[in-house]
Amino acid sequence: MAVLTPGLIEEFLTSQERRGIGASSLEAYRRNLKKLYEYLPEGKTLTAETGRAWKKWLEAQGVSPRSINSRLSALNSLCGYLGHREFQVLDFAEGQEVLQPELTRAEYLRLLQAARALEKERVYLLTKTLGGAGLRIQELSQLTVEAVEEGAVELRYHNGRCSRVLRIPAELREELLAYTQRENISDGPVFRTAAGAPIARTYAVKLLQSVSREAQVAAEKATPRCLFNMYCSTREMILSNISILADQAYDRMLAEEQRIAGWAG
């Protein structure tokens, strides 16, 4: 069980903004979660039954399948952030397919292993950059040799109005530097065409899917979006576990303080 509050909604939205979620998507999240908050009865608790009950209620109100699925997607994202994946809804309204195929960590590793076995170094590094470092495909052109040398890159989006700093993991940084040296890439985008231009999204997908059969991973999972979603899910799981450990440590401290200085002695 979890209690939904306006403050929690804003906390969730802030976390999504830090992930690089766009302004329009954030506004959709805010709008849909506000509707969820208004729907919930007194107490505003979220349970495993909330999503199914909300869906049934929305259908009874005549809300379109597209709108229902948009609201359920917002609920699912919130539940993932809270570490309550068991609250998520998998049974969406008919009329719109909204679920993205989910790439597991094991499948991600198989993609890396397949790229290595096939000696496709660029595919290996592209997979690791998107899935291991959390770079979005639209930010790929900003990953330059200079940024790799620095070990971090300030990514700008929404016409430069927003930015985020992405740290390049040490192991990936070493591999990227070795690759650029072998390929005689001294500056500019790491992933580039023969003419030196950043590779296009469609070509990036083609590269990723070129190893999917060898990796025994469905081609529709070998995409930039699935890699980024896997990265985000992994981080959310780790942060959720850290939060649980922090709560447990705090409770132990309070129990010890109660033993030392509690009213009952």
Image (tube, grey):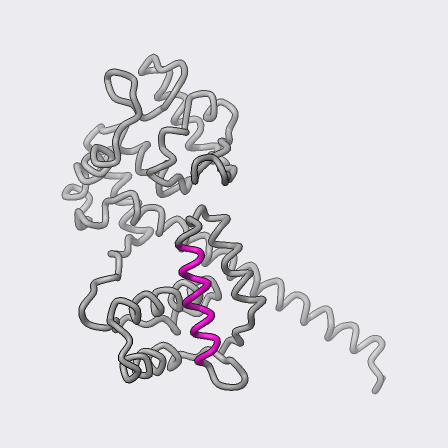
Side (left or right) of 100 relative to 181: left
Query: Residue 36 in magenta?
Result: yes
Judge left or right: residue 133 versus residue 101. right
Residue drawn at x 41%, y 67% is: 32
At a point 37% along the width and 23% down the height, the residue shown is 189
* x 36%, y 29%: residue: 141
Image coordinates for residue 38, horizontal then vertical, percent: 47, 78
- Between 127 and 68, the one nearer to me in the picture: 68
Q: How many marks?
A: 0
Relative depth, front residue between 17 and 106: 17
Image quadrant where one finds the C terminus: bottom right
In the picture as drawn, the residue positioned furthest to the front comes out as 62
Vertical comparison of 223 with 97: above or below: above
Q: Position of residue 124 (x, y in %)?
A: 29, 33
Image quadrant in which you'd find residue 7: bottom right
Position of 131 relative to 43 (above/below): above
Residue 222 counted in the magenta span: no
Point 42% across, 32% down: residue: 172
**Secondary structure that dominates the magenta span:** helix
Residues in magenta?
25-39
Q: Is residue 245 left or right of residue 47?
A: right
Which x, y percent locates residue 104? Answer: 30, 54
Q: Is residue 46 left or right of residue 253?
A: left
Q: In which image quadrant can residue 126 be found?
A: top left
| x and y percentages locating residue 241 in the rendered image | 52, 61
Picture layout, residue 110 above or below residue 187? below
